[in-house]
Image (cartoon, grey):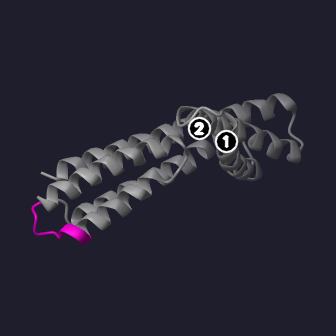
Amino acid sequence: MVYWVAATILVVVNLACVFANMLMLPGNWLMVGSLCVFILSCGTDTGGPDWKTLFIVLGLAFAGEVLEMFTGSAKASKKGASRRAMALSLLVSMVGSIAGAFIIPVPVIGSAIGAIAGAAAGAFSGAWLGEAWNGTDVSKRTEIGTAAMIGRMIGMLAKLAVGAAIFVFQLVSLW
């Protein structure tokens, strides 16, 4: 009985964590933490998730972070972006995401849309400013900024997909 109550709580928390990924919050890491709490509270002799499951989920969460971080840089790099532009793109994207979450006053949906739009605008403007700092011509800056923005969006989708995979993996491991 206790196992199924804890399992239900785990599923609800993990579902909220998947949505937290859309707000640029560390949903994947929160799922790792919630699984750890579940294992510590229920034990591994229940036939459900065990430490092996936790390590697999930990690896998936790490892979999601790597995918998200490097996808934007990789796209911009293919267009000839400087390291400065890629670093500024990542930094301004994070700031834009946080700021964007507060701009649209509609609860949850507005925050998600704002965070995504802020991350996209931040990736573009950070890369554009980095190339401007290097003296790159305007058309090339725009091309690199657009590539950084598209890469950032692909990275966010990849991290969300990894979050969904973590959710499903944990859900299946409960049985």
Please say if 150 is above or below 74: above
Neighbours of disc 2 within 10 Å: few (<14), some (14-19), many (20+): many
Rendered residue at 71%/35% (across/down): 121
Most distant residue in the top direction: 139
Range of residues picked out in magenta: 40-47
Identify residue type, mark 2.
Answer: Ser
Look at the numbered disc 1 and give the secondary structure of its residue: helix
Look at the numbered disc 2 and give the secondary structure of its residue: helix
Identify residue type, mark 1.
Answer: Phe
Mark linked to residue 149: none
Q: Quadrant of the N terminus?
A: bottom left
Rendered residue at 63%/35% (across/down): 114
Neighbours of disc 1 within 10 Å: few (<14), some (14-19), many (20+): some
Q: How many marks?
A: 2
Pointers 2 and 1 in contact (C-beta within 8 Å): yes
Q: Which residue is mark 1?
A: 102
Q: Is residue 32 visible?
A: yes
